[in-house]
Image (cartoon, grey):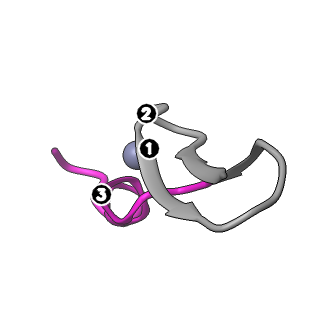
């Protein structure tokens, strides 16, 4: 099983089918949106 982990907040973003354990780092939607908000 593979998992996609957010590189910003370390939360699990998604799972995908894989023969071995694989971890990919991406940004979750939440952190993608944070990038555009400077005044919060
Ligand atoms: Zn995140």
Q: CA distance from mark 3 to mark 2?
A: 9 Å
Q: Nearer the viewer, mark 1 or mark 2?
A: 1
Determine whether, in the image, residue 31 is placed left or right of residue 30: right
> Foreground: 3 or 31?
3
N-terminal of the two: label 1 or label 3? 1
Q: From the image, which quarter does the C terminus lie in?
A: top left
Q: Tell me, yes or no, whether the two marked residues, 3 and 2, touch with CB atoms within 8 Å.
A: yes
Residue at x 56%, y 45% (from the top left corner): 5
The reply to whether callout 1 and callout 3 are in contact (CB within 8 Å) is no
Mark closer to the chain start, 3 or 2: 2
Residue at the left extreme, as displayed: 40
Does the magenta segment cover residue 20?
no
Residue sitting nearer the eye, 31 or 1? 1
- Does any atom of ligand 1 lie closer than 8 Å to the CB of label 2? yes
Q: Which residue is mark 1?
A: 12
Picture disc at residue 9: 2
31 inside magenta stretch: yes
Crowd tier of the residue under label 2, counting other residues whose Cα lies within 10 Å: few below 14, some 14–19, many 20 or above: few
Query: How far apart are the alpha carbons under marks 1 and 2?
Result: 9 Å
Q: Quick check: is the Cβ at mark 3 less than 8 Å away from ligand 1? A: yes
Q: Position of residue 20 (x, y in %)?
A: 83, 48
Left or right, residue 7 beside residue 33: right
Q: Label 1: how many residues lie within 10 Å, few (<14), some (14-19) or many (20+)?
A: some
Disc 3 designates what residue?
30
Task: Determine the image quadrant of residue 29.
Answer: bottom left
CA–CA distance in space, label 1 to label 3:
12 Å
Relative to 23, does residue 16 appear above or below in the rendering?
A: below
Q: How far across and how far down the image is residue 39, in percent?
A: 20, 49
């Amino acid at each position: 099983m593979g998992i996609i982990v957010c590189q910003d907040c370390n939360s699990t973003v998604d799972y995908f089918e894989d023969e071995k354990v694989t971890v990919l780092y991406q940004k979750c939607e939440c952190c993608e949106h944070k990038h555009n908000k400077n005044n919060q």
